[in-house]
Amino acid sequence: MCSTTTYPNLRVDEYCSALLPIPPVAEQQAIAAFLDRETGKIDALVAKKERLIELLQEKRTALISHAVTQGLPAQAAAQAGLNPNVPKKDSGIPWLGRIPAHWEINRHSRYFRSCMGQTILKEDLIDDGAVPVYSATESGAIFGYINSPTVELERGDIVIPARGVSIGFPVLVKERSTCTQTTIFSKPLKPATTHSLYVFYWMAGFRSVLFSYDRTAIPQITVAQVSSNPLLLPTFSEQQAIAAYLDAETAKLDALMAKIRAAIERLQEYRTALISAAVTGLIDVRKESLP
């Protein structure tokens, strides 16, 4: 049993004095063999589901990358009133390849002003503040709240984690907020030209290329790097159509992955319960054999 003090811990004397049920050796062997067999089945099933999630994530990235470089699939384009058979041109960027001839490529800084977030420490946060604070997390989780930010974000701005393991996972701002010094924010300079949701998907589709960093040093990206990144833009109406299409299609994949993760969690809970039941004698492993 762990201590409930500030830092949960298990003391050696507590562990050594704990009562440990010891069945006969033959029974121990039967329990171990049973658990090896049955947990192996569960682990194999979990591994298959985790691999399925990986494949769905790859499909999600490929879906986004294709849409933000080639436009909508023929059927979706027709439904949106767009021509899917437009001339192509060489983008001049090796990893980008050929793109629709009427799309433009410019630096990110032509359309967005980018800066580091403000310095906010844990002790600056309050529970009932007026302004939520984004930090460097992949999921775009709220770090906490403050009342008087020096950096004000609004709907349509983009926050990019700049340090740590979450580098480059963009977050689209949907309300008045701010962000910490571990992030870079981008504010649209030409809202009538750039659709922020499309730009968010552009960043997400090419995160590993746009936000690469030196893995031998402290993981981080810079404002200069973000500002100099290429930004591929179709017409504004196409940006809207692509963003709406990707919202709908990625939502389907996200919902499917959420179901699989829930199934994995249930399997892991079952695994723990099975082990507990077997080692405490709640099930007779000599008679039990799971399908």
Image: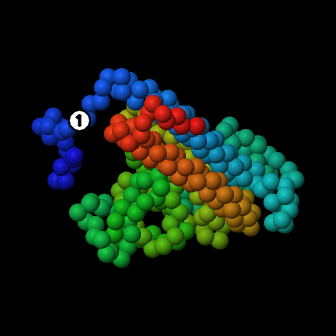
Q: Among all residues in the image, which is located at the extreme front? A: 287
Q: Position of residue 123 (x, y in %)?
A: 23, 63
Q: Which quadrant would residue 98 be assigned to in this image?
A: top right
**Which residue corresponds to the image point at 61% horizontal and 70% vertical from the top-left?**
191
Dot 1 amino acid type: Leu
The kind of secondary structure element at disc 1 is loop
**Which residue corresponds to the image point at 72% horizontal and 44% vertical from the top-left?**
91
Quick check: can you spot residue 160? no
Q: Give the labeled residue for mark 1.
A: 20
Question: Between residues 56 and 241, which one lies in front from this camera angle?
Answer: 56
**Left or right: 11 as drawn, with respect to 177:** left
Q: Which quadrant would residue 147 be assigned to in this image?
A: bottom left
**Which residue corresponds to the image point at 41% horizontal and 45% vertical from the top-left?**
273
**Which residue corresponds to the image point at 34% horizontal and 65% vertical from the top-left?**
144
Q: Position of residue 127 (x, y in %)?
A: 30, 71
As drawn, 284 above or below 130: above
As drawn, 196 above or below 137: below
As drawn, 27 above or below 175: above
As drawn, 127 above or below 48: below
Disc 1 crowd, CA 10 A, few/some/many (<14, 14-19, 20+):
few
Q: Position of residue 185 (x, y in %)?
A: 46, 60
* Quadrant for the C terminus in the image: top right
Question: Between residues 249 and 281, which one lies in front from this camera angle?
Answer: 281
Q: Position of residue 141 (x, y in %)?
A: 43, 60
